[in-house]
Amino acid sequence: MGSRSLSGKMDMLSGTLLDKILIFALPLAASSILQQLFNSVDVAVVGNFAQDEAAATAAVGCNGPVINMIINLFVGISVGANVVISGYLGGHNDEKASRAVHSAMTIALLSGVFLLFVGVIVTKPLLTLMNTPENVIGYAVQYLRIYFLGMPFIMVYNFGSAVLRSIGDTKRPLICLVVSGVINACLNMFLVIVFHLDVAGVAIATVISNVVSSAMVVIFLLREKSVVHLDLKRLGIAKHDLKRMLAIGVPAGLQSMVFSVSNVIIQSVMNGFGTSAVAGSAVALNYENFSYFIIAAFNQACVTFTSQNYSAGNYDRCRRVFRLCMLLGMVMTAALSWTFILGRHFFVALFTGEATVAEYAVTRMMIILSLNMLSTSYEVGGAALRGIGRSMTPAVLTIFGTCFFRLFWAYTVCRAYPSFDVLISVYPISWIITGGAVLIAYFIIRRKAFSQPVRKLA
């Protein structure tokens, strides 16, 4: 059973693990980094060519927590889809895997349309509640409302990529983003420099790029010859699969959603330090995201490999997947983060020429990038738990250890010591607290789960 190659794709059930995890994770990391480049190019272009550079940079850069807070519940459900499809494949239930694929893609389309309307409606009230500076909020509202017009395409791409990852294919999502990323960069320069559309221009370019990436991933699935082939006539939602996707995905999505709420609170406190602080933080955040996507890639590798092997009863292999993903995630994240730290002045200069903005950016980079590999502990630990169907535990622990702690910090410590450095220090402290809690839970739950007989998925 373990030697069979699933649908002609990567065989996660047998053979060596190190090379397969790297083959899976590295293209996924590159894909995520390219996706982040959509926003990074936006920040760089407006930071160098907009009429009001600092305000435009702050407007584009501060929207990340808002976007994530609104969409992360549904992105979490895409993780649930990955686990469900991978589990069926690990148990060799090809027909059920195909049924789950069509459920996932239907959910993607419906959730995208829903998020389009929600995003457009709540944008301005939310930015107002966040105490967004007056010279920034107009730009920010304009950017977000245009951005959310592309939400159906973003959801289709995310769910389509999750389907491809379930068979070990992370290369074709990378191809989608290479193409759309080039289009995004070219359109940014064209719309901002030639037509002087500033924030609106970079938002329009991002939407068009998302249309391209989603169209490509759908074409790949339509032409796919394996069990994850997409047939538009079979689109629909199977209640059983929806229930299982929600059981795994909703806790993960709520975790990310509450996580983003805490970041929105942190952003609102940061807004009180002025436009330069917001702009500098936005610049540094680009490099944090690049480093984090290394962790996210091994997170996805861990949940996908664990799900297939757990369904097949390969418990020892699950343990090795966890160890490899944890080690590789930490080492590679640290290497990339310290590259950014050592070249911090060069990297900051790519986004801004304003001295005050650059100073805030360097401060944030030094505090966060030096320790952000620690977040691997709860990300990979949580992924391993989701892979064996325990999604609620890491969600609850992360909500308390990271989200609630950050809110406590913002409303107590930051009020007593109101400084940019103190505010940013909450991130590494929360990583240590949350990582310890999730790892303890993982080892306790793993001992019990791996002592039970193999369960066949319905």
Image (cartoon, rainbow, N blue to C red):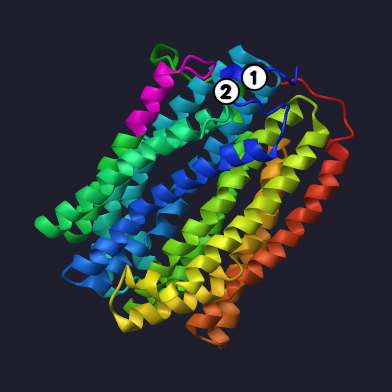
Q: Compute the Cα span from label 2 to label 1.
A: 6 Å
Given residues 252 and 328, the one toward you in this image is 328
Given residues 83 and 321, the one toward you in this image is 321
Expressed as whole percent of the image width and height from the top left, the position of residue 306 reads: 70, 35
Given residues 442 and 336, the one toward you in this image is 336
- Which element is circle 1 on? loop
Quadrant hosting residue 239: top right
Look at the image and say whether residue 20 sits in the magenta stretch: no
Expressed as whole percent of the image width and height from the top left, the position of residue 178 reads: 36, 41
Residue appearing at x 49%, y 20% in the figure: 102
Expressed as whole percent of the image width and height from the top left, the position of residue 181 reads: 32, 45
Residue appearing at x 40%, y 47% in the figure: 35
In this image, 145 relative to 409: left or right? Answer: left
Residue 296 in sight: yes
**Looking at the image, residue 187 lies above or below residue 318:** below
Quadrant hosting residue 77: top right
| Quarter of the image that includes the N terminus | top right
Residue appearing at x 90%, y 34% in the figure: 451
Q: Which residues are magenta?
A: 214-229
Look at the image and say whether residue 221 sits in the magenta stretch: yes
Residue appearing at x 27%, y 47% in the figure: 184
Q: Residues within 10 Å of mark 2 (few under 14, many from 20)?
A: some
What is the three-letter code of the residue carrying label 2?
A: Lys
In this image, 355 relative to 281: left or right? Answer: left
Q: Which residue is mark 1?
A: 5
| Quarter of the image that includes the C terminus | top right
The answer to whether the residue labelled 2 contacts the one labelled 1, judged by CB atoms less than 8 Å apart, is: yes
What is the three-letter code of the residue carrying label 1?
A: Ser
Q: Which residue is mark 2?
A: 9
Expressed as whole percent of the image width and height from the top left, the position of residue 287 reads: 45, 63
